[in-house]
Image (spheres, rainbow, N blue to C red):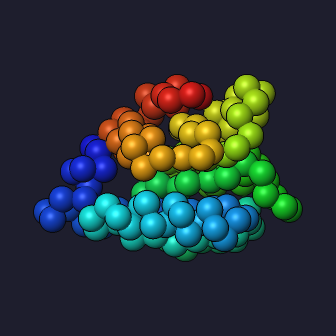
Amino acid sequence: MHSIDEATSTAQPALTCLIVDDSAFMRLRLRLMMESLERVSTSEAANGTEAIQEYSRLKPDIVLMDIIMPGMEGVETVKKICEADPDARVIMISSLSHKEKIAEAKAAGARYFIPKPVTPEELRKAMNDVLSSPETNRSAGNL
């Protein structure tokens, strides 16, 4: 897949996305943004443990991950997902945008960072960047 636009064309299979956030409201908001795109299917996890289980089960094309969650927080979750699947495409979405946390997320394997509140345009750009170049985009966006 090269971009969200190509992935959502009728000739392409559905893009799969795992949304990980402890806030049910934020999961709903992100799901609605993702589902407004054609041919995108989503699943959700409320914490890091659920995220690892869902990622293993689904092998989604992209993961939208919060940093601050109870239990296993986002950076540790990304690290575990990326250790199991180095090709995982994770976009961090968080209200916590300290440079140290962003650097930790990058070191763990995240490919992009979007500060909350996220807009549909920011989400589309991040997804296009991450999907179009899986390895070189580890330095894209704010990472």
Residue at image location 84% in from the left, 61% down from the top = 70
Toward the viewer: 116 or 15? 116
- Residue 89: x %, y % from top left: 50, 48
Up-down relation of residue 39 to residue 72 (above or below): below
Q: Is residue 37 left or right of residue 122?
A: left
Q: Is residue 51 visible?
A: no
- Residue 60: x %, y % from top left: 46, 63
Q: Is residue 138 visible?
A: yes
What count of labels does the image hold? 0
Toward the viewer: 134 or 143? 143
Residue at image location 62% in from the left, 62% down from the top = 26
Q: Is residue 113 left or right of residue 104?
A: left
Q: Is residue 59 left or right of residue 56?
A: left
Q: Quadrant of the C terminus?
A: top right
- Residue 3: x %, y % from top left: 29, 45
Write down the quadrant of residue 61 in the picture. Answer: bottom left
- Residue 30: x %, y % from top left: 52, 61
Write down the quadrant of residue 44 in the picture. Answer: bottom right
Q: Is residue 128 left or right of residue 44?
A: left
Toward the viewer: 55 or 39? 39
Residue at image location 45% in from the left, 41% down from the top = 122
Up-down relation of residue 5 to residue 106 (above or below): below
Up-down relation of residue 38 to residue 132 (above or below): below
Residue at image location 68% in from the left, 38% down from the top = 105
